[in-house]
Image (cartoon, rainbow, N blue to C red):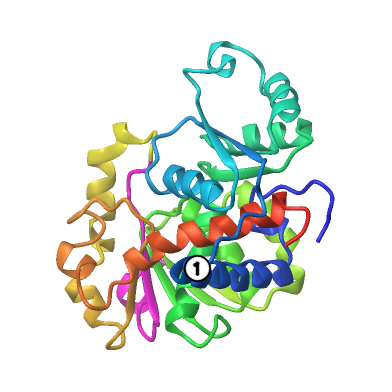
Amino acid sequence: MKMGKRDLLTIANLTADEVRHLLDRAKLLKQWRLQGIAHKPLDGKTLGMIFHKPSTRTRVTFEVGMYQLGGLALFLSEKEIQLGRGETVADTSQVLSRYLDSVVIRTYKQSDLEEFASKATIPVINGLSDSFHPCQVLSDMMTIEEYFSGLDGIKMTYVGDFNNVTNSLILGALMMGISLTVACPEGYVVSDELKEKLALVEKNAKGTYKVMTDPFEAVKGADIIYTDVWVSMGQEDQHDEKLKYFAPYQVNSKLVASAPEGVKIMHCLPAHRDEEITSDVLDSANSIIFDQAENRLHLQKAVLEFLMAETF
Protein backbone atom coordinates (compact mmCIF):
# COMPACT_ATOMS: atom_id res chain seq x y z
CA MET A 1 0.00 0.00 0.00
CA LYS A 2 1.39 3.41 -0.97
CA MET A 3 -0.18 6.79 -0.32
CA GLY A 4 0.70 10.43 0.03
CA LYS A 5 1.40 12.21 3.29
CA ARG A 6 -1.44 11.80 5.79
CA ASP A 7 -1.95 13.13 9.31
CA LEU A 8 -4.00 11.90 12.27
CA LEU A 9 -4.98 15.06 14.14
CA THR A 10 -8.56 13.96 14.83
CA ILE A 11 -10.61 10.93 13.89
CA ALA A 12 -12.23 13.13 11.25
CA ASN A 13 -8.98 12.79 9.26
CA LEU A 14 -10.03 9.21 8.57
CA THR A 15 -12.90 7.62 6.68
CA ALA A 16 -15.08 4.98 8.32
CA ASP A 17 -13.43 2.38 6.07
CA GLU A 18 -10.00 3.50 7.27
CA VAL A 19 -11.09 3.27 10.90
CA ARG A 20 -12.31 -0.25 10.17
CA HIS A 21 -8.95 -1.10 8.59
CA LEU A 22 -7.08 0.21 11.65
CA LEU A 23 -9.24 -1.76 14.08
CA ASP A 24 -8.88 -4.99 12.13
CA ARG A 25 -5.17 -4.46 11.62
CA ALA A 26 -4.62 -3.75 15.32
CA LYS A 27 -6.35 -7.01 16.22
CA LEU A 28 -4.06 -8.89 13.82
CA LEU A 29 -0.94 -7.16 15.17
CA LYS A 30 -2.04 -8.07 18.70
CA GLN A 31 -2.49 -11.70 17.64
CA TRP A 32 0.93 -11.79 15.98
CA ARG A 33 2.51 -10.30 19.10
CA LEU A 34 0.94 -12.99 21.28
CA GLN A 35 2.13 -15.65 18.85
CA GLY A 36 5.65 -14.27 18.78
CA ILE A 37 5.49 -13.43 15.07
CA ALA A 38 7.96 -10.65 14.18
CA HIS A 39 6.62 -7.91 11.89
CA LYS A 40 9.01 -5.07 11.05
CA PRO A 41 7.66 -2.95 8.19
CA LEU A 42 9.23 0.23 9.64
CA ASP A 43 12.84 -0.96 9.53
CA GLY A 44 15.01 2.13 9.15
CA LYS A 45 12.16 4.56 9.95
CA THR A 46 12.33 7.11 12.76
CA LEU A 47 9.48 8.62 14.79
CA GLY A 48 10.01 11.92 16.60
CA MET A 49 8.01 12.38 19.81
CA ILE A 50 7.45 15.98 20.95
CA PHE A 51 5.79 16.01 24.36
CA HIS A 52 4.72 19.18 26.16
CA LYS A 53 2.71 17.19 28.71
CA PRO A 54 3.57 14.23 30.96
CA SER A 55 2.65 10.79 29.64
CA THR A 56 2.72 7.12 30.58
CA ARG A 57 0.58 5.18 28.10
CA THR A 58 1.08 7.41 25.05
CA ARG A 59 4.85 7.66 25.37
CA VAL A 60 5.50 4.02 26.23
CA THR A 61 3.17 2.59 23.59
CA PHE A 62 4.57 4.73 20.77
CA GLU A 63 8.17 3.97 21.77
CA VAL A 64 7.56 0.25 22.21
CA GLY A 65 5.36 0.14 19.11
CA MET A 66 8.06 1.66 16.91
CA TYR A 67 10.62 -0.80 18.31
CA GLN A 68 8.33 -3.77 17.65
CA LEU A 69 7.73 -2.55 14.08
CA GLY A 70 11.48 -2.32 13.47
CA GLY A 71 11.86 1.45 13.75
CA LEU A 72 13.32 3.95 16.20
CA ALA A 73 11.47 6.40 18.43
CA LEU A 74 13.26 9.59 19.45
CA PHE A 75 11.81 11.40 22.50
CA LEU A 76 12.02 15.19 22.29
CA SER A 77 10.84 17.14 25.33
CA GLU A 78 10.23 20.85 24.82
CA LYS A 79 13.10 21.55 27.24
CA GLU A 80 15.53 19.71 24.97
CA ILE A 81 14.70 21.29 21.61
CA GLN A 82 14.68 24.87 20.39
CA LEU A 83 10.87 24.94 20.24
CA GLY A 84 11.01 25.51 23.99
CA ARG A 85 13.36 28.47 23.51
CA GLY A 86 11.36 30.45 20.97
CA GLU A 87 11.83 28.70 17.63
CA THR A 88 8.54 28.83 15.75
CA VAL A 89 6.29 25.83 15.23
CA ALA A 90 6.60 26.28 11.46
CA ASP A 91 10.41 26.33 11.49
CA THR A 92 10.61 23.31 13.80
CA SER A 93 8.17 21.41 11.61
CA GLN A 94 10.13 22.02 8.43
CA VAL A 95 13.48 21.14 10.02
CA LEU A 96 12.26 17.91 11.61
CA SER A 97 10.64 16.90 8.32
CA ARG A 98 14.20 16.70 6.91
CA TYR A 99 15.31 14.30 9.66
CA LEU A 100 12.35 12.13 10.61
CA ASP A 101 9.73 9.93 8.97
CA SER A 102 6.84 10.91 11.27
CA VAL A 103 6.13 12.95 14.39
CA VAL A 104 3.74 12.39 17.30
CA ILE A 105 2.94 15.50 19.32
CA ARG A 106 1.37 15.75 22.77
CA THR A 107 0.55 19.35 23.47
CA TYR A 108 -2.02 21.87 24.67
CA LYS A 109 -3.38 23.79 21.68
CA GLN A 110 -4.92 21.90 18.78
CA SER A 111 -4.02 24.90 16.64
CA ASP A 112 -0.30 24.23 17.23
CA LEU A 113 -0.79 20.69 15.92
CA GLU A 114 -2.66 21.97 12.89
CA GLU A 115 0.08 24.51 12.16
CA PHE A 116 2.84 21.92 12.58
CA ALA A 117 1.05 19.51 10.23
CA SER A 118 0.45 22.23 7.63
CA LYS A 119 4.20 22.85 7.33
CA ALA A 120 5.39 19.25 7.72
CA THR A 121 6.13 16.97 4.79
CA ILE A 122 5.88 13.91 7.04
CA PRO A 123 2.84 12.42 8.85
CA VAL A 124 1.87 14.14 12.10
CA ILE A 125 0.00 12.24 14.83
CA ASN A 126 -1.96 13.79 17.67
CA GLY A 127 -0.76 12.12 20.89
CA LEU A 128 -3.25 14.30 22.83
CA SER A 129 -4.23 17.93 22.74
CA ASP A 130 -6.65 19.90 24.88
CA SER A 131 -9.27 19.37 22.18
CA PHE A 132 -8.88 15.81 20.84
CA HIS A 133 -7.36 12.42 21.69
CA PRO A 134 -7.89 10.28 18.57
CA CYS A 135 -5.52 7.39 19.34
CA GLN A 136 -7.23 6.84 22.69
CA VAL A 137 -10.69 6.53 21.19
CA LEU A 138 -9.56 4.34 18.29
CA SER A 139 -8.08 1.90 20.79
CA ASP A 140 -11.26 2.18 22.88
CA MET A 141 -13.27 1.03 19.87
CA MET A 142 -10.91 -1.90 19.44
CA THR A 143 -11.49 -2.83 23.09
CA ILE A 144 -15.26 -2.57 22.72
CA GLU A 145 -15.15 -4.98 19.79
CA GLU A 146 -13.29 -7.51 21.93
CA TYR A 147 -16.30 -7.64 24.27
CA PHE A 148 -19.18 -7.10 21.86
CA SER A 149 -19.99 -8.39 18.39
CA GLY A 150 -19.24 -5.01 16.82
CA LEU A 151 -19.69 -1.27 17.24
CA ASP A 152 -22.95 -0.69 15.41
CA GLY A 153 -25.77 -0.15 17.90
CA ILE A 154 -23.57 -0.16 21.01
CA LYS A 155 -24.98 2.12 23.71
CA MET A 156 -22.25 4.04 25.49
CA THR A 157 -22.67 6.63 28.22
CA TYR A 158 -19.86 9.02 29.02
CA VAL A 159 -20.17 10.64 32.45
CA GLY A 160 -18.14 13.64 33.57
CA ASP A 161 -16.07 16.46 32.09
CA PHE A 162 -16.71 17.46 28.46
CA ASN A 163 -13.07 17.23 27.34
CA ASN A 164 -10.74 15.99 24.58
CA VAL A 165 -11.77 12.37 25.07
CA THR A 166 -15.46 13.30 24.92
CA ASN A 167 -14.90 15.19 21.68
CA SER A 168 -13.15 12.22 20.11
CA LEU A 169 -15.77 9.78 21.38
CA ILE A 170 -18.47 11.85 19.69
CA LEU A 171 -16.65 11.78 16.36
CA GLY A 172 -15.94 8.06 16.65
CA ALA A 173 -19.52 7.25 17.64
CA LEU A 174 -20.96 9.12 14.67
CA MET A 175 -18.58 7.45 12.24
CA MET A 176 -18.90 3.88 13.51
CA GLY A 177 -22.55 3.49 14.55
CA ILE A 178 -22.35 3.91 18.33
CA SER A 179 -25.21 5.54 20.26
CA LEU A 180 -23.42 7.86 22.66
CA THR A 181 -24.94 9.77 25.56
CA VAL A 182 -22.84 12.39 27.34
CA ALA A 183 -23.86 13.24 30.91
CA CYS A 184 -22.27 16.45 32.18
CA PRO A 185 -23.24 19.53 34.18
CA GLU A 186 -25.43 22.21 32.66
CA GLY A 187 -23.52 24.83 30.72
CA TYR A 188 -21.17 22.47 28.91
CA VAL A 189 -21.65 22.83 25.17
CA VAL A 190 -20.06 21.59 21.98
CA SER A 191 -16.97 23.71 21.26
CA ASP A 192 -16.39 25.50 17.98
CA GLU A 193 -13.42 23.16 17.32
CA LEU A 194 -15.66 20.13 17.68
CA LYS A 195 -18.38 21.71 15.53
CA GLU A 196 -15.82 22.15 12.76
CA LYS A 197 -14.89 18.46 12.88
CA LEU A 198 -18.51 17.35 13.22
CA ALA A 199 -19.24 19.03 9.90
CA LEU A 200 -16.79 16.59 8.31
CA VAL A 201 -18.47 13.43 9.61
CA GLU A 202 -22.17 14.21 10.14
CA LYS A 203 -23.09 13.84 6.47
CA ASN A 204 -22.20 10.13 6.55
CA ALA A 205 -22.94 9.55 10.22
CA LYS A 206 -24.03 6.05 11.23
CA GLY A 207 -24.19 6.73 14.96
CA THR A 208 -25.76 9.33 17.24
CA TYR A 209 -24.90 11.43 20.25
CA LYS A 210 -26.85 13.48 22.76
CA VAL A 211 -25.98 15.51 25.84
CA MET A 212 -27.95 15.52 29.09
CA THR A 213 -27.42 16.55 32.70
CA ASP A 214 -28.89 13.56 34.60
CA PRO A 215 -26.25 10.79 34.90
CA PHE A 216 -28.72 8.25 36.30
CA GLU A 217 -31.04 8.69 33.36
CA ALA A 218 -28.08 8.61 30.98
CA VAL A 219 -26.81 5.19 32.05
CA LYS A 220 -30.16 3.40 31.69
CA GLY A 221 -29.78 0.76 29.00
CA ALA A 222 -26.06 1.43 28.58
CA ASP A 223 -23.69 -1.30 27.43
CA ILE A 224 -20.73 0.80 28.56
CA ILE A 225 -20.12 3.54 31.13
CA TYR A 226 -17.05 5.61 30.36
CA THR A 227 -15.44 8.33 32.44
CA ASP A 228 -12.27 10.40 32.60
CA VAL A 229 -10.57 12.70 35.10
CA TRP A 230 -12.38 15.88 36.00
CA VAL A 231 -9.18 17.94 36.20
CA SER A 232 -7.18 17.72 32.98
CA MET A 233 -3.51 18.63 32.67
CA GLY A 234 -3.15 22.39 32.85
CA GLN A 235 -6.29 22.80 34.97
CA GLU A 236 -4.73 22.04 38.34
CA ASP A 237 -5.72 25.46 39.69
CA GLN A 238 -9.38 24.46 39.18
CA HIS A 239 -9.08 21.24 41.21
CA ASP A 240 -11.20 22.11 44.26
CA GLU A 241 -13.85 23.93 42.23
CA LYS A 242 -14.21 21.06 39.77
CA LEU A 243 -14.46 18.43 42.50
CA LYS A 244 -17.48 20.23 43.96
CA TYR A 245 -19.06 20.88 40.58
CA PHE A 246 -18.71 17.32 39.29
CA ALA A 247 -19.46 15.45 42.53
CA PRO A 248 -22.93 14.33 41.26
CA TYR A 249 -21.20 12.76 38.23
CA GLN A 250 -18.98 10.33 40.10
CA VAL A 251 -19.14 6.80 38.67
CA ASN A 252 -19.87 4.79 41.79
CA SER A 253 -21.81 1.65 42.72
CA LYS A 254 -25.08 3.60 43.01
CA LEU A 255 -24.76 4.95 39.47
CA VAL A 256 -23.69 1.58 38.07
CA ALA A 257 -26.74 -0.02 39.71
CA SER A 258 -28.94 2.15 37.47
CA ALA A 259 -27.38 0.53 34.37
CA PRO A 260 -27.97 -3.02 33.15
CA GLU A 261 -26.22 -5.82 35.00
CA GLY A 262 -22.85 -6.53 33.44
CA VAL A 263 -22.37 -3.01 32.05
CA LYS A 264 -18.72 -2.53 31.07
CA ILE A 265 -16.69 0.19 32.79
CA MET A 266 -14.15 2.15 30.78
CA HIS A 267 -11.62 4.82 31.76
CA CYS A 268 -8.76 6.08 29.58
CA LEU A 269 -6.44 6.42 32.61
CA PRO A 270 -4.78 7.76 34.61
CA ALA A 271 -7.64 7.59 37.09
CA HIS A 272 -7.99 9.79 40.14
CA ARG A 273 -9.45 7.07 42.33
CA ASP A 274 -12.45 8.07 44.42
CA GLU A 275 -12.83 11.33 42.54
CA GLU A 276 -14.44 10.70 39.13
CA ILE A 277 -14.72 6.96 39.82
CA THR A 278 -14.62 4.89 42.98
CA SER A 279 -12.03 2.16 43.44
CA ASP A 280 -14.65 -0.56 43.90
CA VAL A 281 -16.09 0.19 40.45
CA LEU A 282 -12.68 0.63 38.84
CA ASP A 283 -11.52 -2.73 40.17
CA SER A 284 -14.80 -4.58 39.62
CA ALA A 285 -15.32 -7.56 37.31
CA ASN A 286 -17.13 -5.19 34.92
CA SER A 287 -14.04 -3.02 34.47
CA ILE A 288 -12.08 -3.36 31.22
CA ILE A 289 -9.67 -0.47 31.82
CA PHE A 290 -6.46 -2.47 31.52
CA ASP A 291 -7.56 -4.00 28.23
CA GLN A 292 -8.07 -0.41 27.07
CA ALA A 293 -4.56 0.45 28.19
CA GLU A 294 -2.97 -2.55 26.48
CA ASN A 295 -4.79 -1.91 23.23
CA ARG A 296 -3.18 1.52 22.95
CA LEU A 297 -0.03 -0.36 21.93
CA HIS A 298 -1.65 -2.47 19.22
CA LEU A 299 -3.80 0.29 17.75
CA GLN A 300 -0.94 2.78 17.66
CA LYS A 301 1.20 0.21 15.87
CA ALA A 302 -1.56 -0.01 13.28
CA VAL A 303 -1.58 3.80 12.97
CA LEU A 304 2.20 3.96 12.59
CA GLU A 305 2.13 1.25 9.94
CA PHE A 306 -0.76 2.91 8.11
CA LEU A 307 0.94 6.30 7.98
CA MET A 308 4.57 5.27 7.53
CA ALA A 309 4.93 1.90 5.83
CA GLU A 310 5.25 1.80 2.05
CA THR A 311 3.71 -1.68 1.94
CA PHE A 312 2.13 -3.95 4.52
The residue at the point 36 percent across, 56 percent down is 228
| Amino acid of disc 1 | Lys
How would you rate the neighbour count of disc 1 (Cα within 10 Å): few for under 14, some for 14-19, many for 20 or more? many
Is 252 in front, or is 39?
A: 39
Q: Is residue 127 magenta?
A: no
The residue at the point 57 percent across, 56 percent down is 301
Pinpoint residue 2: horizontal percent, then vertical percent.
Answer: 83, 56
Looking at the rendering, which quadrant does residue 98 occupy? top right
The residue at the point 59 percent across, 48 percent down is 70
Pinpoint residue 42: horizontal percent, then vertical percent.
Answer: 66, 49
Is 182 in front, or is 305?
A: 305
Q: Is residue 34 above or below residue 300?
A: below
Looking at the rendering, which quadrant does residue 94 occupy? top right
The reply to whether residue 79 is in sight is yes
Is 26 in front, or is 229?
A: 26
The reply to whether residue 132 is in sight is no
Q: Is residue 225 magenta?
A: yes
Direction from residue 285 to residue 97 in the image, left or right:
right
Q: How many marks?
A: 1
The residue at the point 47 percent across, 72 percent down is 35
Looking at the rendering, which quadrant does residue 12 occupy? bottom right
Is 151 in front, or is 51?
A: 51
Pinpoint residue 169: horizontal percent, then vertical percent.
Answer: 52, 63
Q: Is residue 311 above or below residue 17?
A: above
Direction from residue 303 to residue 256 in the image, left or right:
left
Q: Is residue 241 above or below residue 194?
A: above
Quarter containing the C terminus: bottom right
Pinpoint residue 108: horizontal percent, then vertical percent.
Answer: 51, 34
Q: Which residue is mark 1?
A: 30
Segment colored magenta? 212-232
